[in-house]
Image (cartoon, rainbow, N blue to C red):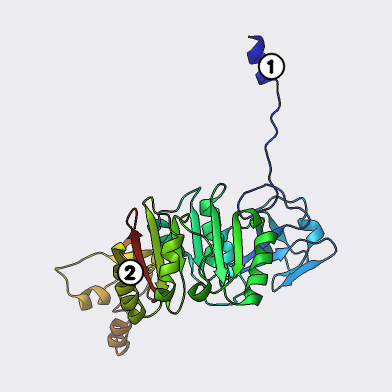
Amino acid sequence: LTVITAVIGTRFEPQISIMSFAGYKQWIEEGDTVFVYMSPQQIKPVTIKSGTSTNNKHGEFAHSEMIGKPYGYSMVCKRTQRSITLLHPTPELWTVSLPHRTQILYGTDISTVIMHLDLKPGSIVCESGTGSGSLSHALIRTVMPHGHLHTYEFHEERVKAARQEFIDHGLGDYVTITHADALTDGFGVENIADAVFLDLPKPWGALETAKRALKKSGGARICSFSPCIEQVQRMCAALTEQGFVDLYTCSALERPYEVKDTILPEANLETPMTDILAADVPGLHYTRPSGDAREQYIKEKHNPKHLPGVKITTARPAARMPGHTGYLTFASLPPGL
């Protein structure tokens, strides 16, 4: 009883980590990266600094007033009475708002890559090239806290920018970024990687070094992203030549659905449509015209929306959907090869 009383009487304080893309905390503090949400198409990352403000079409928002607020807080501009929402950073938000240094992978392709590479906490991954860091952020979150990402980029300025972003986002302990060309310099590691991701114009040129980086104990996977089918054909031939198995190529397309209420007209298989429209229908509150206006009236009202019906909720594919981004080719390295 004494032990139970001591436990019940003890106050447990939640462990709040620093702001990071790899963890969560409740309150906004000085120096945090906060994603300012205005609309699904307008999300902007800002660094909180006292004495400064964020200006957008919704108004001016002082950073000093953001400090101490919880993530998810809706902040209203006193002048315009319009609001923004302050969101905690995630790799998904970074993908849709990052500064583009190169073309990037988006959520649909990123999730496909992580699933087919069988990544999990503790995995070791090699990536070439880093680009704008969209995929890198998602890979780091997947493999942490005990895994690691080795990412390579041949463009020196991109390396500097990405390295600083990793540090600012609290991910520096989980990633090593190297200024190198995987085609000529290789990956610099051997027999440790659970997976290799290649986003290169000629990925087959880096296949031998990628093979050396992959672990030989079994379960190692490789993925190549290529926009053209000719690249896929050549990469598949090279994978087969190097002894890789279970080759699989796919193109991930997102098909959004629109959910909305609509009126389904009641079917009347006995009475002609013209007779229905010409008559007074109870509940529609209109008066039947006469004379020359009658034919025009029937023509204008020959629309199911003007008839009694049943309100139902429908789901249908959107009229427009994102198109082709690239082909993802996956393969496995047999044990001991």
Task: Write the residue at 29% across / 84% down.
Answer: 299
Task: Please tell me which residue is depicted at 70% across the width and 23% down the height of the picture.
Answer: 10
Can residue 276 be spotted in the picture?
yes
* Residue found at x 54% / y 64%: 188
Looking at the rendering, which quadrant does residue 195 occupy?
Answer: bottom left
Mark 2 and mark 1 lie on one chain; the one further toward the N terminus is 1
Inspect the image, locate mark 1, and give the three-letter code of the amino acid beneath it.
Answer: Ala
Q: Quadrant of residue 42?
A: bottom right
Residue 99, relative to residue 148: is it above or below?
below
Q: Quadrant of the C terminus?
A: bottom left
Marks 2 and 1, how far apart at CA: 63 Å
* Front residue of 217 and 80: 217
| Towards the viewer: 145 or 83 | 145
Residue 274: percent from the left, percent from the top? Answer: 22, 78
**Residue labelled with disc 2:** 239
Helix, strand or loop at label 2? It is helix
Q: Is residue 150 left or right of residue 5?
A: left
Neighbor class of circle 2 (other Cα within 10 Å; few <14, some 14-19, many 20+) is many
Res 82 seen here: no
Quarter-of-image position of residue 239: bottom left
Q: Residue at x 50, y 48 (%)?
A: 121
| Callout 2 touching callout 1 (CB < 8 Å) | no
* Mark seen at residue 6: 1
For the residue marked with disc 2, what is the amino acid?
A: Leu
- Residue 33 appears left or right of 215: right
User: On the rendered image, what quadrant is the N terminus found in?
Assistant: top right
